Image (cartoon, grey):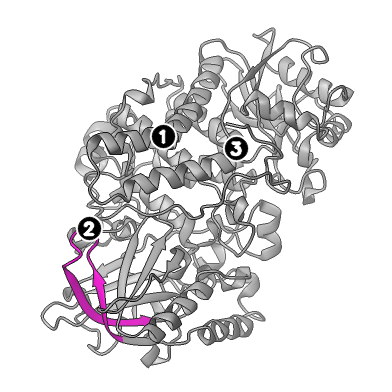
């Protein structure tokens, strides 16, 4: 959602919404294809494979989307202020293929409010009143809009239109295929290439005599949810790897996630073994033995199951389960107790329901927050990351992490451990651009399309797993603000783009699917507003970092370093993306000795600040909303959880 002022609309005809970035009003043809103002340019729109023969098909899809618009324009619509319902703005509501745009009728100050259809979670139409028919739009970025439409039939038409436009049925209906950024053709082609994650492994000192890059998963023939490039122990032969994959759920065999070149300890990840009550696999046992031998300074290794023990035992009845210590030599098994996707979904719904209360007392708010269990779940993820980080940094012991399928809780705790262990992952490029989210989440098969509800699908597959990672990083930032290059605004921006579908980074469920669909990544630049306040000024950067590292080439052009003029008017996460520089002003090299962050108990942090998850500097005016879905926790055999605890 965006709000725009008259100064930004000086060249916009007064009769229609801004034709910014290719979006036109229904009066101008109704073909919506662009983003709102001040967008962080994460990617480009059409992948090369769709550039020629598919162009006509995409135009046809855009026309088909326009056919779902029953009423492109509604006049005399009121937009209510949730804080002060008596305050409202009267204007015209436009529906395009990609946005719903509210244009204020105030002739003195021209304001537009943009709502991207990909961000719409639900559209509700309460009972009509004498003043009109209400329309509540709940967004995935926790924004809520309350419109009052004069006539019920118009409100009904708008509701049906938004419900269809916000629930695409195929990938080509997503916004990233109609968004048209101002980049040249060469850049459009280049930025859809795969991100080379080998550079991060090279930074860790790999490959070496202990770890090698294995071609076993080329063409995704061993595990279709794993990336093609995987590091495994040097002593692991292809038959051992393939045999281990057959004994692991979804074929996700143990592979390297993080390596400490200081003490040779490693963090590996996999899915649960298909052990049942008594099954064993010689190749899988040899695989874990190879991981142990890859750390010559340790006589044992940890195997961390992030699930509650009750869940893991229940999975044994389905032929899955966890490792039997009697069959694996020199392992120490540890259960963590992070709940499954269904519990997390319901917990977020309860927590956000508390935030939606109009005038709660402090005691009611804190009681509701505690009963939601949200902070308890965040603490569980942090505790798991701390355990793994201490095992690697202090004990020098390698760790194998898994949950059920290895793409939800495993990604969470591995990422938290990496943030604690390595300062590079606390930089802009380390967190988002080059490594952590791209590697541990996008590349290793976190199901973004299912978990974030990008397409119409099973509502029980939706869960705020990536939201919890961002919250964990925010919790660490609150305790160690000077240890991070970025601030909360950057995390809010990431969250917004995960759900917006404006770029191809978070579309699809795994690397193979993205290749088959023909799209992959985007631009990761223009970061200035997402930097930590102490690192936002070029003068300070030059002064402080010249002491500790080699000279850095800075882009001092006015265009690159100018801040957006509309920052003071911003009131949504997307509005903070304007003014991001075209390249990161610094690419700090991680020091040779990693410094692990030692966290405090998250329960001692300010619960009132956690309740909205916003940065006090950000100017977020409204963060209350409902959770994306409200289904009860039920057994879902198709999700990554076949069982979950009675609690």
Q: Is residue 262 left or right of residue 302?
A: left
Q: Which residue is mark 3?
A: 340
| 3 or 2: tag closer to the N-terminus | 3
Q: Nearer the viewer, mark 2 or mark 1?
A: 1
- Residue stretch in magenta: 75-94
Q: Where residue 339 appears, x then y in whole percent?
A: 57, 33
Which residue is identified by label 2? 563
- In the figure, 254 relative to 458: above or below? above
Q: Earlier in the sequence, mark 2 or mark 1?
A: 1
Callout 3: helix, strand or loop? loop
At 32% across and 47% down in the image, what residue appears?
Answer: 355
Q: Is residue 435 visible?
A: no
Residue at image position (28%, 40%) is 532
Distance in Å between CA atoms under marks 2 and 1? 42 Å
Mark 1, Cα crowd under 10 Å, few <14 / some 14-19 / many 20+, is some
In the rendered image, residue 326, in percent from the top left (x then y), is placed at: 81, 11
Q: Is residue 77 magenta?
A: yes
> Which of the two discs, 3 and 1, sits closer to the camera?
1
Q: Nearer the viewer, residue 377 or 295?
A: 377
Task: Mark 3 or mark 1: name the one nearer the start of the chain.
Answer: 3
Mark 3 vs mark 1, CA separation in Å? 17 Å
Q: Give me the disc on residue 371.
A: 1
Which label lies toward us, 3 or 2?
A: 3
Q: Nearer the viewer, residue 88 or 51?
A: 88
Q: Position of residue 368 (x, y in %)?
A: 36, 38
């Amino acid at each position: 959602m965006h709000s725009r002022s008259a100064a930004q609309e000086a060249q916009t005809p007064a009769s229609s919404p801004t034709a910014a970035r290719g979006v036109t009003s229904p009066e101008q043809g109704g073909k919506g294809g662009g983003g709102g103002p001040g967008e962080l340019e994460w990617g480009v729109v059409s992948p090369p494979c769709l550039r020629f023969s598919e162009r006509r098909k995409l135009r046809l899809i855009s026309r088909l989307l326009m056919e779902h618009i029953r009423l492109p324009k509604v006049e005399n619509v009121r937009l209510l202020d949730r804080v002060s319902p008596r305050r409202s703005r009267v204007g015209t509501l436009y529906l395009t293929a990609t946005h719903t745009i509210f244009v204020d009728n105030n002739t003195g100050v021209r304001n537009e409010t943009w709502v991207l259809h990909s961000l719409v979670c639900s559209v509700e139409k309460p009972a009509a009143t004498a003043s009109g028919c209400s329309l509540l739009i709940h967004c995935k970025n926790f924004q809520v809009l309350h419109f009052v439409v004069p006539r019920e039939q118009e409100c009904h038409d708008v509701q049906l239109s938004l419900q269809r436009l916000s629930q695409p049925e195929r990938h080509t209906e997503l916004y990233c295929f109609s968004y048209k950024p101002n980049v040249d053709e060469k850049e459009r082609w280049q930025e859809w290439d795969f991100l080379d994650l080998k550079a991060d492994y090279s930074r860790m000192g790999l490959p070496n005599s202990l770890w090698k890059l294995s071609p076993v998963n080329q063409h995704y023939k061993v595990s279709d949810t794993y990336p093609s490039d995987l590091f495994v122990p040097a002593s692991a032969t292809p038959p051992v790897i393939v045999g281990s994959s057959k004994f692991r759920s979804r074929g996700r065999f143990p592979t390297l996630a993080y390596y400490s070149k200081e003490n040779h300890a490693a963090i590996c990840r996999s899915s649960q073994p298909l052990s049942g009550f008594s099954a064993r696999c010689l190749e899988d046992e040899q695989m874990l033995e190879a991981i142990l031998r890859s750390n010559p300074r340790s006589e044992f290794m940890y195997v961390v199951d992030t699930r509650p023990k009750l869940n893991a035992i229940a999975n044994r009845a389905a032929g899955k389960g966890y490792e039997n210590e009697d069959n694996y030599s020199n392992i120490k098994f540890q259960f963590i107790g992070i709940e499954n996707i269904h519990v997390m979904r319901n917990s977020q719904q309860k927590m956000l329901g508390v935030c939606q209360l109009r005038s709660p007392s402090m005691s009611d708010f804190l009681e509701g927050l505690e009963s939601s269990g949200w902070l308890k779940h965040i603490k569980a993820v942090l505790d798991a990351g701390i355990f793994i980080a201490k095992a690697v940094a202090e004990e020098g012991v390698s760790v194998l992490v898994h949950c059920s399928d290895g793409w939800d809780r495993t990604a969470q705790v591995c990422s938290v451990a990496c943030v604690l262990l390595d300062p590079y992952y606390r930089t802009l490029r380390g967190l988002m651009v080059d490594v952590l989210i791209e590697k541990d989440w996008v590349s290793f098969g976190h199901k973004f399309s299912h978990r974030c509800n990008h397409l119409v699908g099973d509502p029980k597959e939706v869960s705020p797993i990536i939201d919890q990672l961002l919250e964990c990083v925010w919790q660490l930032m609150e305790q160690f603000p000077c240890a991070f290059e970025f601030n909360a605004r950057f995390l809010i921006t990431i969250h917004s783009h995960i759900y917006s579908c404006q770029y191809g980074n978070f579309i699809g469920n795994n690397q193979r699917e993205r290749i088959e669909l023909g799209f992959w990544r985007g631009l990761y630049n223009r970061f200035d507003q997402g930097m930590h306040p102490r690192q936002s000024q070029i003068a300070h950067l030059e002064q402080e970092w010249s002491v500790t590292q080699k000279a850095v080439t800075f882009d001092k052009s006015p265009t690159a370093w100018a801040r957006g003029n509309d920052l003071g008017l911003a009131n949504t996460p997307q509005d903070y993306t304007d003014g991001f520089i075209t390249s990161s002003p610094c690419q700090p090299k991680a020091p040779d000795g990693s410094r692990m962050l030692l966290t405090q108990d998250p329960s001692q942090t300010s619960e009132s600040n956690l309740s909205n998850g916003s940065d006090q500097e950000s100017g977020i005016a409204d963060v209350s909303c409902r959770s994306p879905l409200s289904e009860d926790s039920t057994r879902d055999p198709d999700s990554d959880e076949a069982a979950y605890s009675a609690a």
